[in-house]
Image (cartoon, rainbow, N blue to C red):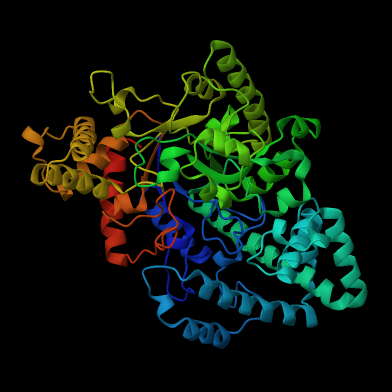
Amino acid sequence: MKTVGLLIPAFSTRRPGDLGIGDTLGLRVWVDWAAEHHVGFLQLLPINENGTDESPYSGISSIALDPIYLAFEPEHIPCITRAEIEAARATLGNCITAHLIDYPAVRQTKNHLLEISFARHNANPDSTLASEFQSFRNRSAAWLPDYCLFKLLMEIHGPNLTWDEWPEDSQNPEAARDFVASIHNENPAQVQSRIDFFAYTQWLCFRQWLDLRSHADHRGVKLMGDLPIGISFHSADVFFNRSIFRINWFGGTPPEGYSADNPFIHEWGQNWGVPLYNWETMEETGFAWWRERLSRLTEIFGMFRIDHILGFYRIYAFPWHPKRNGDFLGLPHHEAEQLTEGKLPRWFCNPDDTNENKAANRANGDFRLRAILDAAGDAEVIAEDLGWVPGYVRPHLNELGIAGYRIPHWDSYSDGSPVLGDVFPENSFAAYSTHDHDSLCATWENCRRTIRLQKEQPTEQGHWASEGAAHSLRLLAGFSGIPIAPGNDWPPYSDAIHWRLVKSLLQANSRYAVLMVTDLFELKDRINTPGTRGNLNWRLRLNLSPHWMTYYGQLLSNLIQLTGR
């Protein structure tokens, strides 16, 4: 059955009473909106705990949830009063209404309230809640103790130091356990209290997210999660399970010649800082790490996206951590080798340069993804298969029943004509953008601006940029039946263009059609710009009035019914 989704980051939602960031109750508002307007699912970004990093793709745990998304209301957080919540809101001041999230201020405020809640619960536990908490700890025994120990070590050594920067007595699991045992002997009550606090926080997180899942199920709306290809080097998973990772190789992408605005990406590629998996060791354990990770993910999400699924076949990797990227900028390869014991970035395990290597990579992807699908159970799996896609990948994904992306203005035939939606595979996920791209209206206007600048101030570089912009607009126009503009004289983005583009996406043959929230509401805000660490990434908060939510929702609902989704 064809369905429509809305991509909306959890942090971007807004509700009366929140604490400066989206939370589970803010998402409940959007679940209800989706149910009322025939939207079948809400697509979220990863919700794992990020420590002090703002990117949802740099979690310090593959399972632990980020407490920053907790909703603070007396009925949802035990032992907290309305007066204390309002006092916390007062301390946040303008952060509550700001367009961008102040992560340090929000984390500090929410953590303060959690400490109050835990102290009161610990001093005088409610028997029902205490039983529920203990049940959660029992059910989470495979991952929670290590996570809590890791959080304690982070607290002791400072949140800004990563585990490879900790003192020597804490840099490996055995030494760290001995270190914590020694301080536990000196002050057992304090150490146990901190361990209990971290477990308590995770209990509240899972409690609220499972409650949101239950509400979404009741309203007939699915929650779609996101499974990053890798886990941060600076995570509890890598710290305690080093045998299942290659901790000296870090995943990324090859050089991008067109990325002139980022010299490192232009020269070397993207280095994400996620250690490669040791697939052979994982196989020996029956993929236990993956099974535990997916069992917790699918408790909350009935469908999920596998980020950079190409990495399950082969992945480009760097023999240095991203914090050393600057050391290699501008270096010729022979000089770079002197800093890495002769190693250079390369493909793991094989480049797609021969039929034999392609067959080996396909076989690797088949084996690994079948293990993932087995662990995922009944959950629907979508592949983020964008970038340089080897020819064997999409047929193989279809064979496995995994839907891959189709982005209209990226797909064209050899003659430059657009691939129309009626020939998109049924088993596909149609979208105009992801969280890493401009919104639909921003794409249109940025292309127009690029073309106009070249007309006004011609340059060689501008010529190629203008040609690319015109090509994108021609594909969008051709895909949606908008008349092609003569002489690249494209009209400004308008409601007529907008709804024609939306309708065309919904008419596509794809099983899934998804609009980013900024696509639907004609916003030019950006969620993330890859390869940058600017102060705008991952900080967008929506400011949509109930009137606009209803207005756009009703127009979308009409098109959903008209197109039979």
Residue at the image point whose x is 46% and y is 31% from the top: 404
Q: Relative to the observer, which residue lies in front, 123 or 315?
A: 315
The answer, for residue 275, to whether it is visible in the render is yes
378 to the left or right of 423: right
Residue 100: x and y, percent? 39, 68
Establish if 364 lies above or below 241: above
**Image quadrant in which the C terminus is located:** top left
8 to the left or right of 186: left
Quadrant hosting residue 155: bottom right
**Image quadrant in which the N terminus is located:** top left
The answer, for residue 199, to whether it is visible in the render is no
Establish if 84 lies above or below 321: below
Quadrant hosting residue 209: bottom right
Residue at the image point whose x is 11% and y is 33% from the top: 483
Establish if 50 lies above or below 185: above
Residue 136: x and y, percent? 76, 59
**Outermost residue to the top:** 355
Q: How many labels sit on residues?
A: 0
170 to the left or right of 19: right
Residue at the image point whose x is 90% and y is 66% from the top: 181
Residue 222: x and y, percent? 50, 47
Establish if 362 lies above or below 71: above
Residue at the image point whose x is 22% and y is 23% from the top: 417
Q: Relative to the observer, which residue lies in front, 304 or 538?
A: 538
Residue 396: x and y, percent? 53, 20
